[in-house]
Amino acid sequence: MKNLTPAFANEFATPELRRSVVGMWAGQIAVTGFVAGHACLPNLWLHLGWLLIAGVTALFCTEWTPYLRRWQADAGALSVVSFLLWMTLRSCSQIPFMPDSMLGEIMRGMVGTGLLMMFCMLVWQQAQSRESLNVMGWVAGITSALAALISIVLSYFVLPSHAAGERLTNLLVHGGLNPVCTGLIFGFAALWLAALMDHESTPLPRRLAWVAIALLHFAAFLSGSRGAMLALACGHAVLLSAHGWRRGRLAIGVFLLTGALYFTSAPLFARIAQWRSEPAAVTASAPGITDHFQKAVERGDNSRLDIYRAGLHAMDNHWLGTGQWGVCGIWQCELQAKRSIMMMSHLHSAFLSTFVHGGIIGAVLLLMALGFGIKRACRLAVQGDATWISLLAFGCGGLLFDGEALTSLATAPRFEGLLFWLPLTVALARGSTMSRSAENTF
């Protein structure tokens, strides 16, 4: 063994091997930082900049020839490439007819699509190691839990501009991330951690994780996002179906208990508000016990049906769609008379948006990629890893009534890459019958 050690050291010291190791580490840093950054990086520039800088390093240091050969023979990978290629070409065909003011939107779209393709490549690379995926899930989960704890404490107990019981926003991002984005990101992290607990046997990490899971579930409910609640219900239903009651009862129990706590917490938040207020400023009437439920019902559909109707009416060719860039004004014209929704800049449904912008062809290509992903995620669940089918169910449930586009990372909500492309790409990479590494590293 002593004679082999120097030879191994010399081999490890070769430039090719060093470059490969740097590529794997850079890819891990790029993807993990980007995924966890949804909960803690304060703005678009830092979030996408992290992925760009570390991702370019990983792309440069990685030998992609084996991956390219595999992708050429992989129907799932080809379906993703076909979808992104169609949506981009369809949108580029309108550029000569756009006004000059849309140049910024075009550049943003092209950069966002390029970043999305790089993200999918790096996720596919990291998916070959289950250890890398576990690290990613733990970092995202704990980071999100810390962001949730800080936001709850500051919003409900410290900052005078916030009130106890208001819809929770992640104060680490944009100084107050949209409640819908907050709920979906925290809920996704909670479900991911819950799925990881199926393979964690060490007592201390398990206890820490379940505390984080309960906190993230409650934070997702505190956001008041019905999309996050629907996504959590979809994800937990699939996780319970895959695990069975004996293995899945703890996760579904946390989900149900935190939901019940949220919907009955109005009197508690009323007391917190009274404690924070001066006696003279305390209102005579406290919120009722069904206050959170009533607020959710009173919001109705938030004008989504009007937005969806306007988007569909803007299509003059149902096969080709409208394209993605510079067409917002077409469907916004129908909303100008409605002051509450005239400023909506996207269609608030990632799947409907794909149909409007890409037509029937774009929708079919998306469904093909999703179909391959679901099939392979189910294959992984049969093998014992239900993480990706449950996260994919969460993403589809959340994006059904939210999201801007599935072809860019530079969207307004910025969560499509996390909710949809991360679980889909991992499922395609690890669930393929051509992938031996999925078995070797599982």
Image (cartoon, helix red, strand yellow):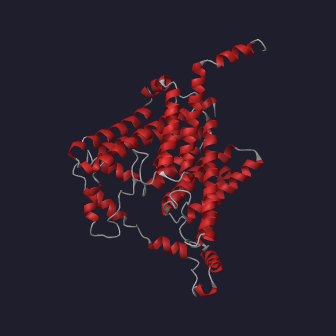
Instruction: From the viewer's side, name the closer residue of 15 and 262.
Output: 15
Q: Position of residue 380 (x, y in %)?
A: 57, 38
Q: Is residue 23 above or below residue 220?
A: above
Residue 190 image position (x, y, % from top left) = 60, 53
**Viewport quadrant of the N terminus:** top right
Residue farthest to the right, as pictured: 2
Figure check: 217 above or below 109: below
Q: How many marks?
A: 0
Q: Quadrant of the C terminus?
A: top right
Q: In this rendering, does residue 432 appear at all? A: no
Please say whether residue 214 is visible from this viewpoint: yes
Q: Residue at x 49, y 42 (%)?
A: 424
Q: Residue at x 30, y 70 (%)?
A: 338
Residue 244 point in image, percent of width and height: 63, 50
In-front residue for pair 407/27: 27
Where in the figure is residue 411, as x and y percent of width and height?
Answer: 41, 50
Depicted 66 relative to depicted 109: above or below: above
Question: In the shown orientation, is residue 398 left or right of residue 331?
Answer: right
Asked if 10 appears above or below 224 in the picture, the reply is above
Q: Residue at x 30, y 42 (%)?
A: 361
